[in-house]
Amino acid sequence: TLPSFLKSDNKPNISLDSIKKNVYFITSSAEIYSLNYQNRNINWLFNLTGATFEKKTDLFYSSPVVHINDEILLSNSLSTFSMNSTNGALNWEFPFSTKIRPIVSKSNIFLVSKKGFILNLDRKKGTVIWSEDLFKSSKKLRHEKTGDITSVLLISDQLFMTTERGYFLFLDYQNGKIFNYAKVSKGFFSKPAVVDGTIFIIDNKMRILQFN
């Protein structure tokens, strides 16, 4: 792949399509590839900095790639993209950037920044259904208290978030309002995993924590 002149903290991420035998991955030079791992041919290549918006940046980062059916979703340092996974065509682009993995449901895409700004987009059109600034709308929680948002999951019809200072946040997925929260640790080492209604996470003391 093409080299990048500036190093970034963008971690390699890859998404697998075992049905079509494709892998999708992003490089540090802001290119997303579709590669058939069976015949080792490149299906297509798309440069994410060649976006429709005029704003440009030299320091690139991206969220993990999400592949569902014939769609690829990801966010980079400029925008959030929906792409056709078969041919690399751009479905839509929305001017919101985050490193946190997008959460995708049947009709919606949930995006959250580390500072707590959350968006619910229409998955087909890329238009805003609702938006919420978590720490401005909450009287009890402030960003200085919780630290950055580090992950988000959709579980049991609610949005579940973790923060760098050990908080769990639970939000109504229909409007983004916080209805419950708890400080469970001084900080997390890993992202949470949810199995059979149980939350597992490793804290910064390397302990495995289990919650219902």
Image (spheres, rainbow, N blue to C red):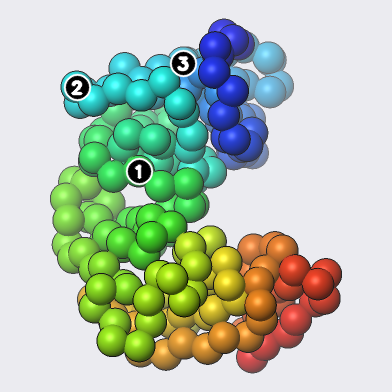
Which x, y percent locates residue 156?
47, 82
Q: Is residue 191 above or below residue 168?
A: above
Q: Which residue is mark 2?
A: 54
Residue picked out by circle 1: 97
Mark 2: amino acid: Glu
Residue closest to the far top: 2
Q: Residues within 10 Å of mark 3 (few under 14, many from 20)?
A: some
> Disc 3 or disc 1, which is closer to the eye?
1
**Apparent side of residue 32 relative to residue 93 in the rendered image (left or right):** right
**Residue 15 rendering spot, x and y as whole percentages:** 59, 39
Q: Amino acid at mark 3?
A: Leu
| Residue located at (24% from left, 68% from top) | 132
- Give 23 or 8, whichever is nearer the viewer: 8
Residue ID at (53%, 61%): 150
Residue 1 percent across, percent down from the top left: 60, 11
Amino acid under label 1? Ser
